[in-house]
Image (cartoon, helix red, strand yellow):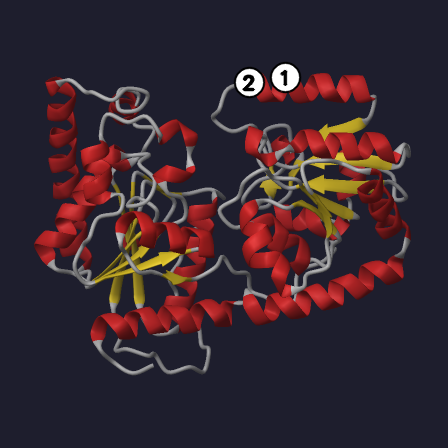
Amino acid sequence: MLTSRPMNTGLMPSTPPKRIGFVSTRFAGTDGVTLEARKWAHLLAGMGHSCFWFAGQLDAAPDSGVEAPLAYFAHPEVSALQARLFGSTTRSRETTTTIQRLKEALKDELYRFIERFRINVLIPENILAIPMHVPLGLAMTEVIHETGLPVIAHHHDFAWERERFVVSAVNDYLRAAFPGATPRTEHVVINSMAQKELARRCGLPSAIIPNVLDFETPPPGVDDYNRDLRQELGLRDDDWLILQPTRVVLRKGIEHAIELVRRLRDPRAKLVISHPAGDEGNAYMQMLHDRIADAGIDVRFIADRVGEKRGRDAAGRKIYTLFDIYPHADLVTYPSLYEGFGNAFLEAIYFGKPVVVNTYAVYARDLDPLGFRAIEMTQLVTREVVEQVREALQSADLRRQWAYVNYDLALKYFSYSVARRKLAARLANLFGEGV
C-alpha cells in the first residue's frame, strides 16, 4: 500500500512543508517506477511534506489519491491508440483527434486532483520520459505550463532507449512533451548516460538521483514465516538456491543463468526464477523452456508463490515476498542485457549475496567503477565465470568478505540518505531556500 505517513528522522525540512502530487500511469505492484516513487514519498514525508497520488491504476488509500482509469496505459482506448502511434511515420487525422480528446479528458482529471489535494509541487514519474501513454504526457505538460506549478520530473526510461519507439508517427509530440522544456522544472534521471543524452538531445540539464535502498536499516532475515521456504519450494538444505530475481523478458538475459547452472554440473544447483513473464509475448518463455530441457537442469518458476505481501493463495499455500526469498539464496544471477539502473543488483548487495552480473552499459559506467565485488560476465558464460561462481558458492569466507565491502559501498552511494539530500536540493532549487 502506498503511504506518505511522516517519519521522525531528526532532520528539519529543507523547505516549509509542501503538498506533493505524484503522477503516473500506474502506482501499484512492484514495478520499478512504483517502487522508487514509494521510496521518494517515504523520504519526503520524513522531511515534513505530504504526498498524494494520481494514476490510472493505484493502490493508495482513497483519501490520499485519485485513480483515473483513463490514465492507465492498458486502458482499452489508450492501448488501441498507442498501437497506431509507433511503427509508422504518419498518423491519420482521426488519430490526432483521438489524442487530443483523451488529452483534454486527462487534463480535467489532473486539475481535479490538484484542486482536491491543494497540490503545490508535482512529481511526474516517467510519464514525461517514455511514451507509454502519449495523451497523458501531453496533458501533464500542458497542465505544468498552465498552472506554473513547480515540478520534479523523475525520468526512468526514455523513448530513445527503446527500439519499439524508434519509428514514430508522433515525433512532434515526443519533442513537445517527452520531455518538454517546461517552466520551474527540476529534471531527475537515474544514471549518468541518461543525463548526458538528455542534455545532448533536448538541451535540458538534470540531476542524478540513483535508485536507492534503505541501507541504514539492516535487511530482514529468516523468521518464523519464511523459515520453511526451501521446503515449500521442494529444495533441500544443502541445495544451492541460485536466484534470478527478475521478470521473464528478453532483456533480462535469463538464458545466461541457465547456461551457468548447466556448466556448474552439480545436482545441488537449482535455478529459482521469482517473477512472471512480462508483456512481450510467449516466444522468450518458450525458448527458455527449450534451453532448460536441453540443459537437463532443475529450474523452478515460482511467480505463483511470490507477491507484494505475505499471505495465502486460493489453495491455502503461503505467498512469500521477494525479501523472504533473498535470505535463503546462495547466489544471485543478474545477466541483464540492458537496465536503466539495476535494482536487483542493489538488493543482492543489501542481503549480502554474491552476484553474477552482465556488464550492461549503466553497470559498466556508474556501478563498476565504485569498486563493488561481483562476478562479471560480458555476454558470455566463460570458464572463468563458472569457476568464480563455484568458488563463491563453496567459500563462506569469500562471501562474507564481499558482503562487507559491498554493503559499505552501497551505504555510501545508494542509501536513503543520498536520495534525501538530493531531493532536498531539488526543492531548494525550486523554492529558493537554503538546504
**Residue 418 x, y percent position in the rendering:** 48, 70
**Residue 422 x, y percent position in the rendering:** 40, 70
Near-viewer residue (342 or 111):
342
Tell me the residue at 54%/44% (across/down). Answer: 308
> Which amino acid lies under the numbered mark 1 shown in the image of this protein?
Gln
Q: Kindly identify which numbered label has been placed on residue 125.
A: none
Tell me the residue at 69%/29% (across/down). Answer: 255
Is label 2 in a helix, a strand or a loop? loop
Tell me the residue at 45%/82% (across/down). Answer: 10
Q: Tag 2: Cα neighbours inside 10 Å, few (<14), some, or many (≥20)?
A: few
Residue 105 drawn above or below residue 328: above
Residue 370 drawn above or below residue 32: below
Quarter of the image with the C terminus in it = bottom left
In the picture as drawn, the residue positioned furthest to the left comes out as 146
Labelled pair 2, 1 in contact (Cβ < 8 Å): yes
Q: Kindly identify which numbered label has been placed on residue 282.
A: 2
Tell me the residue at 37%/83% (across/down). Answer: 12
Q: Which residue is mark 1?
A: 286
Horizontal side of 75 relative to 163 (left or right) equals left
Tell me if residue 135 can be seen: no
In the picture as drawn, the residue positioned furthest to the front comes out as 200
Near-viewer residue (35 or 134):
134
Residue 23 drawn above or below residue 417: above
> Which amino acid lies under the numbered mark 2 shown in the image of this protein?
Asn
